[in-house]
Image: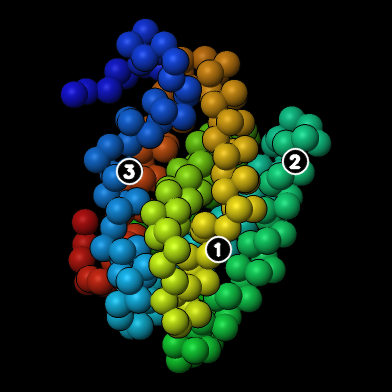
Amino acid sequence: MTVPESFQAFLNENPDAAFHDWLRESAEPFWTKATAHRFTEELAEGTLDPQVCARYLVQDYAFVDSFVSLLGYAVAYAPAMPQKRPFAGFLAAVTSEENDYFLRSFQALGVPETQWRDPELAPVTAELLSVLQDSGRSGSYPQVLATLLAAEWSYLTWGLACGDRRPQAFWMAEWIDLHALPEFEEFVTWLRDETSRVGAAATPEVQQQMCRTFRHMMQLEERFFDHAYDPEARR
Ligand SMILES: Cc1ncc(CO)c(N)n1
């Protein structure tokens, strides 16, 4: 089954669909591979190798740094206060609770400060950072939405798939919590609606660009999890 290349054609086939349905379906097989990855399954089961987790968190701390800047751009580009507010609220959570989680985890996992402060970036991390930076600097609210939605909706999806499984170790349990808490779900649901509102009203060219970015992000999300297991892999 192929997904129509334009949102209009997708709507003709699926009259009740939202814009975000088109984004997600167009991002297969990467969407499914990134939201049902071995990494998140081992996280839920508590069988994740601490070294794999440490490698992942070091790269992800670099991701989160650029991600926070992208949220700053979202605050700037959002048309008015009703949109700026949810972005600002989420920005506050990432720079406080989530940042604390990273620092405590680095300590518990024995990651030296030099490593998390100035990490050697994996190729996939470097690519992710450049997508985030390009989106931020694009001046385009739709483009920022597509990038943020790929990152957050995919994380919510695996977070919810963990159900009530929470391993003993806090560096696993709290990483699940951060992506499954009701506040996070509420933010992502809002972000999805906002992206669909803006996307549905955009020109076909902007819709295509959003779709390409969302798919590229999902491709990188899968590779990002892969990297934690096989740091030498180049693709
Ligand atoms: C790579 C990646 N994507 C998405 C998220 C969720 O913010 C994250 N922490 N890391």
Tag 2: amino acid: Lys
**Nearer to the camera, 19 or 136:** 19
* Residue type (three-letter) at the residue carrying disc 3: Trp
Q: Earlier in the sequence, mark 1 or mark 2?
A: 2
Proximity of marks 1 and 2: CB atoms separated by less than 8 Å: no
Mark 2: which secondary structure?
helix
Q: CA distance from mark 1 to mark 2?
A: 21 Å
Residue at screen point 66% across, 69% down: 97
Residue that carries the numbered disc 3 in the rendered image: 31
Circle 1 packing at 10 Å, graded few (<14), some (14-19), many (20+), is many
Evaluate whether residue 111 shows in this view.
no
Residue 230: numbered disc = none
Disc 3, ligand 1: is the CB inside 8 Å? no
Type of amino acid under label 1 = Leu
Quarter containing the N terminus: top left
In this rendered view, identify the residue nearer to me: 102 or 157. Answer: 157
Please give the label number shown on residue 178.
1
In this rendering, is residue 152 above or below 95?
above
Residue 227 locus on image (x, y percent): 29, 66
Q: Return the x and y of residue 55 as percentages of the image width and height.
A: 37, 76
Name the mark on residue 84. 2
Q: Nearer the viewer, residue 165 or 82?
A: 165
Residue at screen point 41% across, 67% down: 165
Q: Distance between the Cα atoms at labels 1 and 3?
A: 20 Å
The answer to whether 33 appears left or right of 131 in the picture is left
Residue 115: image location, x then y, percent = 46, 83
